[in-house]
């Protein structure tokens, strides 16, 4: 996979991540800053490091599975795996400016 192909695939993966919402907050998980890393291997396998708004998040079981399934469905992706480190812990400063504006934090 060329660097250009990898970049196009990453863009499609990020677009898919922007379609996944935290059910308690009307902002997608990418803009919320829950996605720490997106790594794409030469074989088009996508490894994602993401966190949750809190370790006691009510969707702690279902949200990572939803992310894996949606990312794996992106054309050109051979598979996906989500890892959830809680370091660093998420806080609202990780949100994009657009997300902070939408939620009234700015």
Image: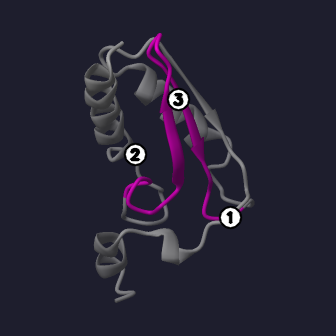
Residue marked by disc 2: 20
Identify the element where label 2 is drawn.
Answer: loop
Among the two numbered marks 2 and 1 on one chain, the one whose residue lies closer to the N terminus: 2
User: 11 and 57: which one is in front?
Assistant: 11
Residue placed at 65% from the left, 56% from the top? 58
Residue placed at 38% from the left, 19% from the top? 73
Report x, y in % for residue 22.
47, 56
Identify the element where label 1 is drawn.
Answer: loop
Residue marked by disc 1: 54
- Left or right of 33? Residue 58 is right
Real-space CA distance between mark 1 and mark 3, rounded to the nearest whole angstrom: 19 Å
Real-space CA distance between mark 2 and mark 1, rounded to the nearest whole angstrom: 17 Å
44 magenta-colored: yes
Q: Which mark is residue 68?
A: 3
Report x, y in % for residue 9.
31, 26
Report x, y in % for residue 21.
41, 52
> Which region shows up in magenta?
28-54
């Amino acid at each position: 996979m060329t660097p250009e192909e990898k970049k196009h695939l990453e863009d499609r993966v990020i677009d898919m991540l922007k379609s996944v919402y935290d059910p308690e907050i009307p902002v997608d998980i990418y803009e919320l800053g829950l996605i720490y890393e997106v790594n794409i291997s030469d074989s088009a396998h996508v490894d994602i490091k993401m966190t949750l708004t809190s370790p006691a998040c009510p969707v702690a079981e279902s949200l990572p599975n939803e992310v894996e399934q949606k990312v794996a469905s992106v054309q050109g992706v051979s598979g996906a795996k989500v890892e959830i480190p809680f370091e660093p812990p998420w806080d609202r400063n990780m949100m994009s400016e657009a997300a902070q504006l939408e939620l009234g934090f700015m």
